[in-house]
Amino acid sequence: MSAAADKAALHARGVAALAAGLRAREFSAVELARALLARIDAHAALNAFVARDEEATLAQARAADARLARGDTAALLGVPIAHKDVFVTRAWPTSAGSRMLRGYLSPFDATVVERLGAEGQGAGCVSLGKLNCDEFAMGSGNESSCFGPVRNPWDRTRVPGGSSGGSAAAVAGRLLPAATGTDTGGSIRQPASFCGVTGIKPTYGVCSRHGIVAYASSFDQAGVMARSAEDCALLLSAMGGFDARDSTSAERPAQDYAAALRTARAGASAARPLAGLRIGLPREFFPAQLADAVQQPVRAALAELQRLGATLVDVSLPRTELCIPVYYVLTPAEASSNLSRFDGVRYGHRAAQFEDLTDMYCKSRAEGFGPEVKRRIMIGTYVLSHGYYDAYYLQAQKLRRMVADDFQACFGTCDVIAGPVAPAVAGRLGEQGDDPVKAYLADIFTLPASLAGLPAMSVPAGFSRVDGSAELPVGLQLVGNYFHEGTLLHAAHALQQATDWHARVPQGY
Ligand code: GLN
């Protein structure tokens, strides 16, 4: 292949392959960034990007090239990424998908952005811009963004999932090799599943929340989406680790998750790399009515994991169904408090006309927030109010603890928990209509790990057709015990060495 043809296919390479090519000087970070920016423009119909600034990107690429020329060995030098639009950035506006914040320019970078970046001690990634998401990360379809919906590259009439829909669509459409996301109740795992990419949300506290626009602070966690577990491991290693600027940051040093992939399990062999791994299947994650379109690929992936040496054991998470009301009491409560800062005074939108101060608050908030955000602010204010606090908020907090305890009981007999990510494949744009409860119910399999603060990932597990649709991806969810991200990534990597579901590309990309 000629050098020119080789460069034309840069978008086909993942993080590890690009980092190797950059280090070998096959192409420069500037060339790579230019190639992908052109690709982003060519696929603007996906609506994955909401902010793009060629000069800002090229400045970072030049910084990465200079570091490469100096022989700097940072693992991700020159690798292009982009951030979900809830991470604040100096170089691009941060809108969190909301009219309220539209165009807001932060005076600082989020810790995750800084750690991944090309400047200073950063890992060397070059950011291509900001990625579309649901308004304030509330949603499951990326349809509540003020920038309009994102489209799923596997079928552009369908949603990419949410709230990190732009991140998932951009990775699936090969616009970039990896992207950041955040997961409060499934917003990395569910879009990863719907778009056929690999996504991981680490244990609560592994990635700093400093500089992430808050939705529900005791749940929000940053993570990453890429094409493979190996690529996720490389990014997550650079993102995580203690940050004194986040009071809930776990006091643990950054981990080398890529090393975990290379470390063989005791008793494992090349043919059975997962020997000794006990995978628990909660019976509540496989209800009789679970759609075949989801059940079959998930079962096929589990059979593959078994072939690789893992054993499957029966476990129970008896409060799975309760996770929905618990989550939809607690997260609105936290959101109602977090979003009170958007008052038209300090940040974002201010109404043009008002009578007095109270009227200014009311009009600014009424105009700035979309319907789903308003709904959650109202629910949150209600469940925290005098007289209802004990009945709703306090009860939900108690149940949250019980769900975490249920997981610990499971981890007595298994190392990893597996099941579907979502009860269905990606739905059609607009299908959800104005029935928010329908969307909330579909979060059933991702919420338990979120309530417990456990690490969880979505791994491509195959494809299904529904109602004559194109092939649509289906993800397998893996949940680990606290700080066992390495175990999840190791199992996903073994699966990806033996299968090609994660490597398939949607037609036209
Ligand atoms: N669908 C969930 C919600 O709407 C998850 C969102 C998230 O994880 N940010 O709250």
Image (tube, rainbow, N blue to C red):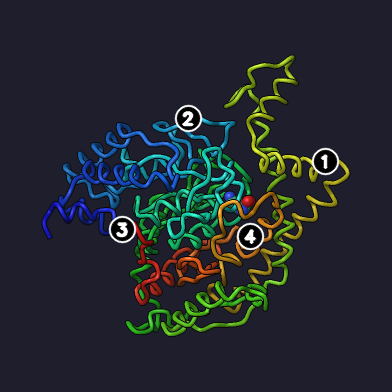
Name the foreground residue: 393 vs 162. 162
What secondary structure is found at the residue carrying circle 1? loop
The residue carrying mark 3 is 14
The kind of residue tagged 3 is Gly
Disc 1 and disc 3 in contact, CB within 8 angstroms? no
The kind of residue tagged 2 is Ser
What secondary structure is found at the residue carrying circle 3? loop
Sequence-earlier tag: 2 or 1: 2
Neighbor class of circle 2 (other Cα within 10 Å; few <14, some 14-19, many 20+) is some
Asked if residue 165 lies left or right of residue 55, the reply is right
Q: How far, Cα to Cα, is label 2 from label 1?
A: 33 Å
The residue carrying mark 1 is 385
Is ligand 1 closer than 8 angstroms to the Cβ of mark 1?
Answer: no
Disc nearest the viewer among 4 and 2: 4
Sequence-earlier tag: 3 or 2: 3
The kind of residue tagged 1 is Ser
Q: How far, Cα to Cα, is label 4 from label 2?
A: 32 Å
Identity of the residue drawn at 45% across and 50% down: 167
Identity of the residue drawn at 31% across and 37% down: 57
Sequence-earlier tag: 1 or 4: 1
Q: Residue furthest top?
A: 355
- Image quadrant assignment for residue 358: top right
* Quadrant assignment for the C terminus: bottom left
The residue carrying mark 4 is 443
What secondary structure is found at the residue carrying circle 2? loop
What secondary structure is found at the residue carrying circle 4? loop
Q: Which mark is residue 106?
A: 2
